[in-house]
Amino acid sequence: MLLDEKLSKLKDTYETLLIHKNKNEMRRVVGLFHSIIDYAYEGMYIAEIQIDQEGEGDD
């Protein structure tokens, strides 16, 4: 499922971000924050589509 993939990418990216933060590699941290934001937005849109599809089935 697409949403599960986005959640997995969020989790993996967050864990990688923490590793780079602990190494004080702040440019990488900034880049990873951008990735997290992208994955979160994509996940939000996927979830909204699923909500809309579920709503159509309730009619």
Image (tube, helix red, strand yellow):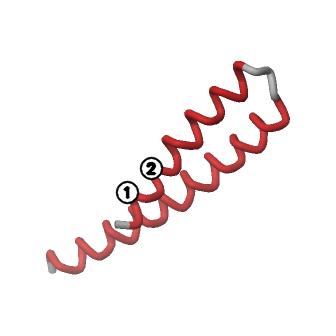
**33 relative to 7, above or below:** above
Q: Which mark is residue 36?
A: none
**22 relative to 8, above or below:** above
Say which of 24 and 33 sits in front: 24
Residue 19 vs residue 56: left or right? right
Where is mark 1, residue-wise?
4
For image coordinates 33% across by 72% down, the residue present is 52
For the N terminus, which image quadrant? bottom left
Name, please, the residue furthest toward the left. 58
**41 relative to 29, above or below:** below
Where is mark 2, residue-wise?
8
Amino acid of disc 2: Ser
Residue 46 vs residue 33: left or right? left
| Residue 48: image location, x then y, percent | 40, 65
> Neighbour class for label 1 at 10 Å: few (<14), some, many (≥20)?
few
Check if mark 2's residue and mark 1's residue have beta carbons within 8 Å: yes
Residue 50 vs residue 43: left or right? left
For image coordinates 23% across by 72% down, the residue present is 54
**Which image quarter: residue 33?**
top right
| Residue 8: image location, x then y, percent | 44, 49
